[in-house]
Amino acid sequence: MTIDAQPVASHFIDGKPIEDEAGENLQVIYPATGEEVASLHYATPAIVEKAIAAAKAAQQDWAAMTGTERGRILRRAADIMRDRNRELSQLETIDTGKPLQETLVADATSAADALEYFGGLAGSLTGEHIPLGNGDFVYTSRHPLGVVVGIGAWNYPTQIACWKGAPALACGNTMVFKPSETTPLCALKVAEILSEAGAPDGVYNVIQGAGEVGASLVSDPRVAKVSLTGSVPTGRKVYAAAAAQMKHVTMELGGKSPMIIFDDANIEDAVSGAILGNFYSSGQVCSNGTRVFVQSSIKQRFLDRLKERLETVIMGDPLDEVTNFGPMVSAQQCEIVMGYIEKGKAEGAQLVTGGARADMPGYFIQPTVFADVKDDMTIAREEIFGPVMAVLDFETEEEAISRANDTEFGLAAGVFTNDLTRAHRVIGQLEAGTGYINTYNLAPVEAPFGGIKASGVGRENSKEAINHYSEARSVYVAMSEVEAPY
Ligand code: NAD
């Protein structure tokens, strides 16, 4: 590999890279080979302190700029990001192992979309005038929350850094972002680019660390809000810690989302949707539709075509643009996923294809499909976060809806059918924050994204996100004498 992944320093605080070698060593491993590609340090308490202090010091001046000025900086950052898409995508591929074919179109590009979209909105964040009939009125205004902490998962490191950073900064907050310890590289680039685009020092800071560093950020009283992308168990801990100080939260958590394929669906589209919803990023996508309910009469046709298409997957060097299926992000994730595959076999699901590690270096697992999966099997209940699809049969619409909803999660849901009224009727009853009809897993910045039930709180993207990174205040204005009873 010829790309130099080693950053100049582990952290980016107050407009510059900064190192503290007293922090524990953090090795960055390229998942396609298992080799170390960079070496960083976890944040020490001194680094955590510096980052929060820098964000706190910068916040009022940043908020005092007009929204248009803040937006211009974000839009400039979006342009820089697009200009450097290839370089950023290569780094993301090294950080995550995802094929370059994917990172070129779905990470820095999506991050740039968020910077552009929220940059465009920043100048229009206004309040309301509310007439009260007697001449009195109320006006409202939108205010930033203050210092926002962003904590990321490892599957979309550039995108997550911007899905949180862009709305936070547009609203006049400053940010301390902690990427996942598994993928620490890309967020540093986001910080550099924002700085180059004109973000004042301290507005967007990045520090490295695992859960402990994350927890120390969450509990700091100077932090007003925490936005986490991670698993449900981590979400419960972070939400509880934030609640202790009555902080705002956005929780983008895990899922076990259903996809329901009716017998009148276009089979080719349904297979494509199931492939996108289970094997893109080697299955490491939160909104994946991993419980694929297929109406019995088309089950065999669906499985045959799915197997046929999965046999054409190209596994290999993720930096080669021909490769369309990469490894798991880490040895640990590979082990977790293999554990689920073994459970699937042991609990009696029928293995249709895959089911083993690929015979090559790195953490590759074959795309795996189980059929005849029952609702109570482990692979139908728990989030696997790997390339493992569970296919379940169903007979009636009512049955499919009730089984699809029988989960603690509620991130996404999809329906494939050519019956227009059934499509809307079914999607309307599925308990999910993000629904799809005849497609799966698209997440344009214009649309709200997030979960219900245990899958999360708050929404990212779209105008909705503004409500989660700012708060409304109201002022009552009396235009007449004040009446008092005595
Ligand atoms: P994780 O929960 O292990 O870690 C997420 C982040 O939280 C990491 O940065 C980690 O260091 C940090 N963390 C861990 N303990 C903490 C604590 N006590 N306090 C503060 N921070 C702490 O998740 P992961 O394995 O990195 O990512 C996979 C999970 O993320 C999956 O469950 C997936 O569904 C979810 N995810 C959700 C979305 C979404 O938008 N809903 C997107 C991507 C991933």
Image: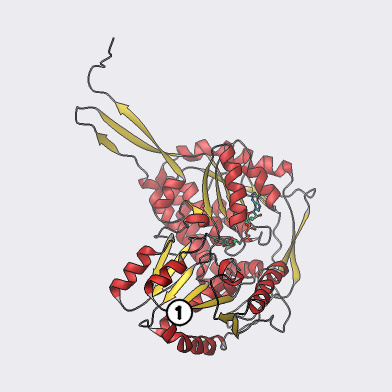
Residue furthest to the top: 486
Q: Nearer the viewer, residue 29 or 15?
A: 29
- Say which amino acid is labelled 1: Val
- Ligand 1 sits in quadrant: bottom right
Q: Nearer the viewer, residue 313 or 44?
A: 313
Q: Residue at x 20, y 27 (%)?
A: 135
Is 395 located above or below residue 220 in the figure? below
Q: Would you identify the image quadrant in which residue 483 lies?
A: top left
- Residue 438's spot in the image, x, y percent? 38, 75
Answer with left or right where residue 211 lies relative to residue 159: right
Q: Is residue 321 visible?
A: no
Q: Would you identify the image quadrant in which residue 230 lies?
A: bottom right
Q: Residue at x 60, y 59 (%)?
A: 153
Q: Secondary structure at mark 1?
A: strand
Answer with left or right where residue 324 lies relative to residue 415: right
Q: Nearer the viewer, residue 128 or 306?
A: 306
Is 334 located above or below residue 204 in the figure? below
- Residue 284's spot in the image, x, y percent? 59, 69
Label 1 crowding class (10 Å Cα cut-off): few <14, some 14-19, many 20+? many
- Residue 158's spot in the image, x, y percent? 57, 61
Q: Residue at x 53, y 61 (%)?
A: 159
Answer with left or right where residue 32 lies relative to residue 58: right
Instruction: Write down the residue under mark 1.
Output: 294
